[in-house]
Image (cartoon, helix red, strand yellow):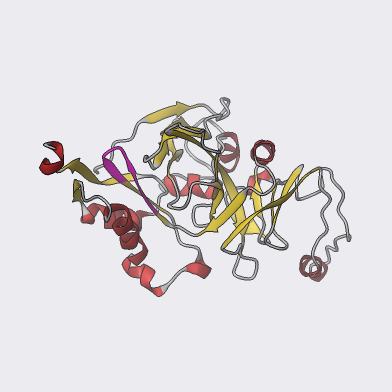
Amino acid sequence: MRWIITCLLFTAAAELSADTYNFRVGDEVVGNVGVYVLKENDNFLALAQELRVGFNELVEANRSVDPWIPEAGERIIIPTRYVLPNVKQNGVVVNLAELRLYYFHPAEPGSDMRAVSTYPISVGKSDQWGTPLAETKIIGKRAKPNWYPPKSIRAEHEAKNDPLPAVVPAGPDNPLGDYALRLQLAGYLIHGTNVPEGIGMRVTHGCIRMHPKGIERLFSEVKVNTPVQIINQPYKVGWLKNKLYIESHAEIEEYQKAASKNLTQFVKAVVKQTSDQQAYQVDMDWEEGYAQARNKRGIPFSIATRQLTAAVETE
């Protein structure tokens, strides 16, 4: 296998504070893959919260390990290296395929460094309750929010003999958690939760759900009118210095196209990242690229290198 990754050894007791990364403008990969040694009674549902990754991404990165009764002493991969989404690096970016939110902090004038924070999220659980693609913005912030269940959700609960009140006040029974960010996209929020075990899964009615500690931090950082992009990029391709990486994820069913079977989206992503490299000689390993695109483990792999052409070097 052609990948060598710098790994960090994590302990569950050491809560990850490294969900904010500094990167140089032009670089498109941040973080490092971690390694965790499993202990007795560990399970992925609890570990995902402690290590601040999503449940699904922890499972996909460690497919050979039983997520419910893993063997003590075994080492698992903590997928904390990311190819940044290929969009304008401004404000909040939600990548549905990745089940992850990025917040690009405002650029410092005159600096060639940027900062990005990233958090696991939950999104809409089906076509009926899917989270829509959108370019929107934050129009309101509320701590200790009340929840006003929409008629559709109240009807769903009534059908299950579990009726909801018209208003759920702030508190431990409120599914919005302690913080909510209202989007200009009518009816949709970025909010916390009173059931953090579901973070990193498709379990919501369309809103974007975050871990309580994650939304608390994001709430303190973003302002009203911060732009929000909701995208679907199952194949992210980006440069780090002179290596090109791919990070692939399973596609969201409702956005999956027939062309995805031949990896058209992956090819388009590679072409987009290599078409403006006229000053470089790019050595692309297409066989490895296709293999990693199909792999969908959510871990960046190197699939190409570049070097300045002789003409540029002698100028």
Residue 175 percent coordinates (x, y): 76, 50
Q: Residue furthest bottom?
A: 258
Residue at 48%, 51% in the rendered image: 88
Query: Is residue 279 visible in this depiction of the protein?
Result: yes
Give the residue drawn at x 52%, y 26%: 11
User: Start and end of the magenta stretch?
Assistant: 236-244
Q: In this view, does 211 lie above or below 113?
A: below
Assess whether residue 48 is covered by the magenta stretch. no
Q: Residue 14 placed where, x, y %?
A: 56, 25
Q: In this view, does 104 lie above or below 152?
A: above
Name the foreground residue: 308 vs 4.
Answer: 308
Q: In terms of depth relative to the viewer, which is nearer, 282 or 195?
A: 282
Query: How many callouts does the rendering have?
Result: 0
- Can you see residue 74? no
**Figure quadrant of the C terminus:** top left
Residue placed at 60% from the left, 64% from the top? 132
Left or right: residue 189 versus residue 7 is right
**Residue 154: where, in percent of width, then height?**
81, 66
The image quadrant that residue 197 belongs to is top right
- Please check the rendered image and state whether residue 243 is part of the magenta-colored stretch, yes or no: yes
Task: Determine whether 176 is above or below 222 in the image.
Answer: below
Using residue 106 as the reference point, say whether residue 248 is left or right of it.
left
Q: Is residue 76 left or right of residue 239?
A: right
> Dividing the image into 4 quarters, which one contains the N terminus?
top left
Q: Is residue 77 left or right of residue 285?
A: right
Measured as percent of width and height from the top left, residue 125 is found at: 61, 62
Main SS type for the magenta part? strand
